[in-house]
Amino acid sequence: MSVQRTLSIIKPDATRRNLTGAINNKIEKAGLRIIAQKRIKLSKEQAGIFYLVHKERPFYDELCDFMASEPIVVQILEGEDAILVNRKVMGATNPVEAEAGTIRKEFALSIGENSVHGSDGETTAAFEISYFFSGLELVG
Ligand code: ADP
Ligand code: MG
C-alpha cells in the first residue's frame, strides 16, 4: 500500500443533475481526500486530447461531444491506493454491471453518460493530473 493521487471527473450528466455533492460524499466516505477541485467547461478539442487513448474506439466522437456539452468538476483524490479505491467506488463502466453502492450503479444514465471518470493507473494519473492542475493548485 502507498499513498497515491488520482484524477477524478464528475461528468456533465452528473453536474446537470446536481449530483456533485452526492458523488463527493461517496468519494470521501471511501476514505479519499479531495485535495484539489474545480468546475470547468471543456472545448471539444480539449476533451479530445484528454481521451486521445480512445481515438480509435467507435464512441470517441460521441464521448468528446458529451464531455464538452456542459460543465464538469475535475478533482484530485489522495489516499492509500487511491487509484484502485476510486475505481472501486466508481463501479464498472457499464452501470448495468456496476456493484450495488457504487457511484455508477446509483447515478449513471448509460455506459456513455456514466457520471464519473477515474484514472486507471499511475502513468495515466500523472498525465491526467498535470492536464488539469498546476502545482500551485495542489493545496492538500
Ligand atoms: P472507464 O471510464 O470505466 O475507464 P473506458 O476508459 O473504457 O471506461 O471508457 C472511457 C469512457 O468512454 C467511459 O467512461 C464512457 O463514458 C465512454 N464509453 C466507454 N464504452 C462506451 C460504449 N460502448 N459506448 C459509449 N460510450 C462508451
Ligand atoms: Mg478509462
Image (cartoon, rainbow, N blue to C red):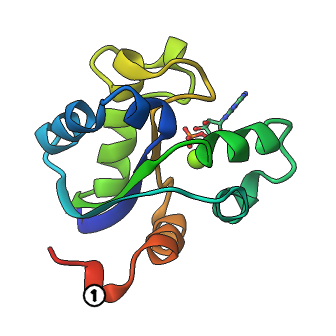
Q: Position of residue 6 (x, y in %)?
A: 37, 61
Would you say 26 lies left or right of 85 here?
Answer: left
Residue located at (51% from left, 18% from top): 109
Q: Quadrant of the N terminus?
A: bottom left
Q: Quadrant of residue 98?
A: top left
Q: Quadrant of residue 113?
A: top right
Where does label 1 land, which residue? 136
Would you say 83 lies left or right of 122 here?
Answer: left
Q: Position of residue 117 (x, y in %)?
A: 48, 45
Q: Secondary structure at mark 1?
A: helix
Looking at the image, residue 108 lies above or below residue 130: above
Residue located at (70% from left, 65% from top): 49
Q: Position of residue 43 (x, y in %)?
A: 65, 59
Q: Quadrant of residue 46?
A: bottom right
| Mark 1 surroundings within 10 Å by alpha-carbon count, few (fewer than 14), some (14 through 19), many (20 or more) | few
Number of numbered tags placed on the structure image: 1
Query: Looking at the picture, which amino acid does disc 1 mark?
Result: Leu
| Residue 59 or residue 5, whichever sits in front | 59
Residue located at (17% from left, 77% from top): 139
